[in-house]
Amino acid sequence: MNKSQLIDAIRHQKSFLSIGLDPDLDKLPEGISKDAKGVLAFCKKIIEHTAPYCCSYKLNTAFFEVLGPEGMHVFNELVQYIPNSHFVIADAKRGDIGNTSRMYAQTFFETYHCDGLTVSPYMGSDSLKPFLEFKDKYTIVLGLTSNEGAQDFELQNLENQTKVYQYVMKTVASWGTPQNVMFVIGATQETLQKEIRSHYPEHFFLVPGVGAQGGSLEATCQNMLTKDFGILIASSRDILYADSGPEFYLKSAEKAKAISQNMWQLYSELF
């Protein structure tokens, strides 16, 4: 899915919500078995009932890999189960030397047919450029993340007082284009969002951290929305575990609908 197709998907769905599929066995609701089959059943129910209220799904590979070979089979089934109209992200945060990165890119872009893949930029150009060679695919690069540990490296100053994340984003942006590079920008980084958007007016941002991590949907929209949207708001736990009863998916759908309607109202007010 290319940029124009992603924008069309958002307009069609009236939503720039990306629902994170992070199926934690310890949090699966009543009546769902705590194994790979249970994860498949749980996620399919979530997708079936929330698809009208989002434009994207983000599958965190760790929650599938922990289940062994069966888990990656479930991952593959879910990617195929998601409607073709939705943007599919593999949240794998890959990054290694060039030939290894090429295999990672082929794995998620060709074997699993995902539209986007999260990657770590900290091994440099030869670790990222193999991902950028794939047409109509998004390399989603860690920019300024929402976790507390962002202080340890990303927000540190270099000798010229440029922060590490600023140097990383500027450099990575020069290797690709807004058509194939997306950045992860945390919703909790509210005071820096507007400045970041000013430097990257055409890029899409994947924005985790709204809800459970304390980020503000309203502030994120005000700071980073563009006429062509430019953001995907990622929400996982608030939607997945909205209810623990046998009809958990109804509450999940209700929560996704509420978030989607809220974000569309904010967009309508701004544009």
Image: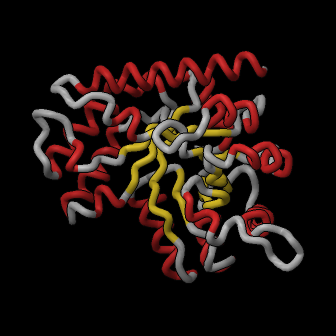
Q: Quadrant of the N terminus?
A: top right
* Colour pattern of the rendering: secondary structure
User: Does 265 sit above or below residue 169?
Assistant: above
- Exactly how many numbered labels are in the figure? 0
User: Which residue lies at the image location 21% right of the left edge and 64% below the top edge?
Assistant: 69
User: Which residue lies at the image location 47% right of the left edge and 66% below the top edge?
Assistant: 106
Q: Position of residue 67 (x, y in %)?
A: 21, 60
Residue sitting at the far right: 160
User: Does 163 sit above or below residue 38?
Assistant: below
With 203 as the anchor, is 40 left or right in this view?
left
User: Which residue lies at the image location 61% right of the left edge and 63% below the top edge?
Assistant: 150
User: Which residue lies at the image location 36% right of the left edge and 23% below the top edge?
Assistant: 253
| Most foreground residue, 42 or 187 | 187
To which quarter of the image does residue 14 belong? top right
With 59 as the anchor, is 134 left or right in this view?
right
Q: Position of residue 89 (x, y in %)?
A: 48, 49
With 113 as the anchor, is 3 left or right in this view?
right
| Most foreground residue, 168 or 45 | 168
User: Does 257 sit above or below residue 124?
Assistant: above
Q: Position of residue 129 (x, y in %)?
A: 65, 71
Q: Position of residue 166 (x, y in %)?
A: 78, 63
Q: Quadrant of the C terminus?
A: top right
